[in-house]
Amino acid sequence: MSAVHDRDTTPEMRVRQAAHSLGYRYSLHRRNLPGKPDLVFVSRRKIVFVHGCFWHAHKCRRGRRTPVSNTEYWHTKRERNKKRDNEQQRFLRAADWKVLVIWECWTRDLTALRKRLQDFLN
């Protein structure tokens, strides 16, 4: 578990590189916002979260995978993560922020990722 990081992950770096190459500038991990969003576009009032498929229980193949040992613990942990994510996003939207969640599996197709970012940030 010591190899698991909450920032500067490969998917996050791909999103950051894509946003930067499109000409957008952003802040990282703003502590004054719920959930410490991965990318914050302050002037546009837009936020991007980059979620790992396993940790946030995405509906893709990797997100549906359940560890064989200690299954109940992992199920509870991932459900708690999803609930917390939803609460944070609801709070941010109520505060007039636009929120985009980018899943780890989406970062593999860089063309589609750039298009998704471009559509969201325009």
Image (cartoon, rainbow, N blue to C red):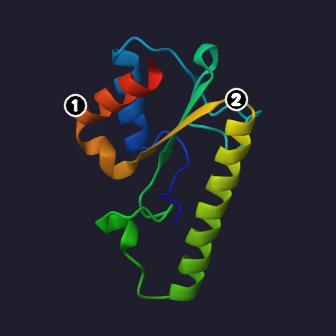
Identify the mark at residue 41; answer none if there is no mark: none
- Residue 81 position in % (x across, y down): 61, 63
Q: Is residue 4 left or right of residue 14?
A: right
Question: Can you identify the residue that label 2 sits on?
Answer: 96
Please tell me which residue is depicted at 54% across the width and 78% down the height of the picture.
74
Q: Nearer the viewer, residue 100 or 72?
A: 100
Q: Nearer the viewer, residue 65 or 98?
A: 98
Discs 2, 1 touching: Cβ within 8 Å: no
Dot 2 amino acid type: Asp
Secondary element type, mark 1: helix
How far apart are the two marked residues, 2 and 1, measured between alpha carbons? 29 Å
Dividing the picture into quadrants, the one containing residue 23 is top left
Q: Nearer the viewer, residue 11 or 63?
A: 63
Please tell me which residue is depicted at 50% across the width and 14% down the height of the picture.
25
Identify the mark at residue 111; answer none if there is no mark: 1
Secondary element type, mark 2: loop
Where 48 falls versus 42 (above or below)? below
- Residue 28 position in % (x across, y down): 59, 28
- Residue 27 position in % (x across, y down): 59, 22
